[in-house]
Image: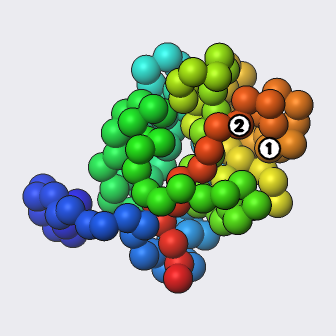
Amino acid sequence: MQEGSGSTVTRHLPLKVTEKSLEQLFSSIDDYLGTNYRPGGASSHGFDCSGFVFYIYKQNFRMLLPRTSGELALLGSMVPKKQLRPGDLVFFSSNGSRIDHVGIFIGENRFAHAATGGIMINQLQERYYNFHYACAARLITTE
């Protein structure tokens, strides 16, 4: 969204952002740790996984993103797991046939996401997440 107006501007992804705005992203994530899980939620009153990504990216980068994890997985450039950078989105599939969960990679094999226990940080190598990991996408970059 363009500063100071309600109009939208289309940009190619990944969107170039400053290191400062990336740091603000992580600060924002910290602010919401423990916030309740709410199916369909996309506000500080409660989030689902894609609602959390939608809210955080809108607040920090003024990006208007799709509202489902499956739609989010179609954006940006695909990133091999070994090349993940902070700010990349990580996607999971519980049944192996469709993307049904998303989180924000924050570095050191950790990602933030909305789970039934609320907003939390988990390790990608935890058994469940490692097994259900599907792919990753880069929507923002500092380079």
- Looking at the image, residue 81 sits to the left or right of residue 12; the answer is right
Residue 116 drawn at (x, y percent): 67, 19
Residue found at x 53% / y 78%:
142
Q: Quadrant of the N terminus?
A: bottom left
Mark 1 surroundings within 10 Å by alpha-carbon count, few (fewer than 14), some (14 through 19), many (20 or more) = some
Residue 88 drawn at (x, y percent): 58, 57
Displayed quadrant of residue 107: bottom right
Residue 52 drawn at (x, y percent): 51, 38
Q: Which of label 1 and label 2 is nearer to you?
A: 2
Helix, strand or loop for disc 1: loop
Instruction: Tell me which amino acid carries mark 1.
Output: Leu
- Looking at the image, residue 120 sits to the left or right of residue 31; the answer is right
Residue 100 in view: yes
Instruction: Tell me which amino acid carries mark 2.
Output: Tyr
Helix, strand or loop for disc 2: strand
**Pointer 1 residue:** 124
Of callouts 1 and 2, which one flags the residue occurring earlier in the amino acid sequence?
1
Give the distance between the C-alpha atoms of the residues marked 1 and 2, in whole angstroms.
Answer: 8 Å
Above-or-below relation of 56 to 85: above
Residue 125 drawn at (x, y percent): 86, 42
Disc 1 and disc 2 in contact, CB within 8 angstroms: yes
Residue furthest bottom in the image:
143
Mark 2 surroundings within 10 Å by alpha-carbon count, few (fewer than 14), some (14 through 19), many (20 or more) = many
- Looking at the image, residue 48 sits to the left or right of residue 114; the answer is left
Above-or-below relation of 1 to 127: below
Residue found at x 34% / y 56%:
63
Kindly identify which numbered label has been placed on residue 53: none
Residue found at x 26% / y 66%:
11
**Pointer 2 residue:** 133
